[in-house]
Image (cartoon, rainbow, N blue to C red):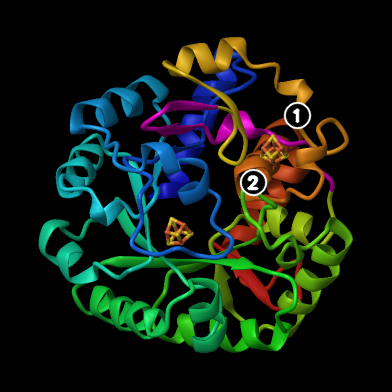
């Protein structure tokens, strides 16, 4: 269903001649969280406005103005928002695909206020097996809650994905075990990305440089059990392994927060704009990206590069054919893994 909706959406953009358009909108209805993860830029950058909340109306108005087919709800911890159930159901009612990113500590609340839907999936944050994850989130026991939550969500009929940020110093074998276990638990797809070096985060040694990330992702993917499903598109996974080069297309993943639209991207905010139109019309997109802005040099995040893979596929029939083929054929084009 998602592929069909995306295909139709992309065709409409092409027919209209639109050069830049959103694929996934990131909606952050609040920035406060019930954890203090070591690598998290949000809770540090937005410290002065952690108490601020977007209203249901503000969320819907931003979603409608942006008009992306996919909305990823993040933060902060979205389940801490008092009206998160209303926000999710209103966006789902517009037949947009909603992915709610959560650390799962409030999963019991989520089970009560959000109804399962083909348009909705939880995305549970899981940075490794027990010890690694609990160190990353700086609290013991969080891994066990996340695993319990995934099981409860699956039992209650929800779609579940996971999101894993890979940091320097961890071993590929740990991810082989983690991803195999999640697959066996019924997780629909795992999303992966290297951590971004936020200036607000004190421990810069946890972030991988580009070359290190390429070889690390090759070792991770090459050692994964056959047939595992990753939620990122396969061309982006090639990019992570250094097999393709892309220019950043941060405009494909605009981010709305209680401070406004982040300009230029999910990761860096030189300023915030009050409308999506203003973001699209006033940002000098070419000023950012690898080799243009030093803050971008270590960035390989999906918010910048997953859209580039889709954009390439729209422009080049061979890339489109490869994307379509590898998305439906597990293991094709890469040793062991398949994508959504
Ligand atoms: S759970 Fe997410 S939002 Fe909360 S501190 Fe960790 S990374 Fe940041
Ligand atoms: S490379 Fe793109 S997505 Fe990454 S920080 Fe720079 S502008 Fe943002």
What is the magenta range?
245-262
> Residue 306 got which mark?
2
Percent position of residue 267, x then y: 60, 41
Q: Is residue 156 left or right of residue 14?
A: left
Q: Quadrant of residue 114?
A: bottom left
Q: Residue at x 47, y 26 (%)?
A: 261
Instruction: Calculate the distance from the C-alpha at mark 2 to the C-alpha at mark 1.
Output: 16 Å
Choose between 311 and 295: the one closer to the eye.
295
Say the numbered circle drawn on residue 307: none
> x, y percentage for residue 312?
73, 37
Graded by Cα atoms within 10 Å as few (under 14), some (14 to 19) or many (20 or more), the crowding at tag 2 reads many
Residue 137 drawn at (x, y percent): 48, 71
Task: Evaluate whether residue 234 shows in this view.
Answer: yes
* In the depicted structure, whether residue 337 falls above or below residue 58: below
Identify which residue, 35 or 330, lies in the foreground: 35
- Number of numbered callouts drawn: 2
Q: Position of residue 59 (x, y in %)?
A: 28, 31
Mark in front: 2 vs 1: 1
Residue 288 is labelled as 1
- Give the residue displayed 61% in from the left and 14% down from the top: 17
67 with respect to 253 (left or right): left
Q: Is residue 163 magenta?
A: no
| Mark sitting earlier along the chain (2/1) | 1
Where disc 2 sits, the SS reads helix
Please check the rendered image and state whether residue 250 is part of the magenta-colored stretch, yes or no.
yes
- Residue 225 showing in the rendered view: no
10 relative to 325, above or below: above
């Amino acid at each position: 269903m998602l592929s069909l909706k995306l295909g139709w959406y992309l065709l409409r953009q092409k027919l209209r001649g639109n050069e830049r358009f959103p694929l996934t909108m990131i909606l952050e209805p609040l920035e406060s969280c019930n954890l203090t993860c070591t690598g998290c830029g949000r809770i540090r950058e937005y410290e002065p406005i952690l108490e601020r909340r977007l209203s249901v109306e503000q969320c819907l108005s931003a979603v409608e103005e942006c008009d992306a087919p996919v909305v990823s709800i993040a933060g902060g911890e979205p389940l801490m928002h008092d009206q998160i159930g209303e926000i999710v159901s209103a966006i789902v009612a517009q037949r947009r695909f909603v992915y709610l990113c959560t650390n799962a500590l409030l999963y019991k609340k989520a089970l009560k206020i959000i109804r399962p839907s083909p348009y909705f999936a939880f995305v549970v944050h899981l940075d490794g097996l027990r010890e690694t994850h609990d160190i990353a989130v700086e609290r013991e026991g969080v891994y066990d809650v996340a695993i319990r939550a995934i099981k409860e969500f699956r039992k209650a009929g929800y779609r579940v994905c996971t999101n894993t940020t890979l940091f320097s110093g961890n071993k590929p074998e740990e991810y082989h075990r983690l991803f195999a276990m999640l697959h066996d638990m019924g997780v629909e797809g795992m999303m992966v990305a290297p951590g971004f070096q936020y200036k607000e985060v004190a421990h810069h040694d946890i972030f991988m440089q580009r070359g290190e990330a390429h070889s690390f992702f090759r070792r991770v993917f090459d050692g994964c059990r056959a047939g595992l499903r990753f939620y990122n598109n396969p061309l982006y996974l090639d990019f992570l392994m250094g097999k393709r080069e892309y220019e950043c297309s941060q405009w494909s993943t605009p981010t709305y927060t209680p401070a406004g639209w982040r300009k230029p991207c999910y990761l860096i905010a030189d300023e915030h704009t009050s409308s999506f139109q203003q973001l699209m019309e006033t940002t000098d997109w070419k000023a950012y990206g690898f080799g243009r802005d030093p803050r971008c040099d270590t960035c390989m995040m999906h918010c910048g590069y997953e859209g580039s893979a889709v954009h390439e596929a729209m422009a080049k029939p061979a890339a489109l054919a490869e994307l379509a083929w590898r998305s439906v054929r597990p293991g094709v084009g890469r040793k062991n893994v398949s994508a959504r």
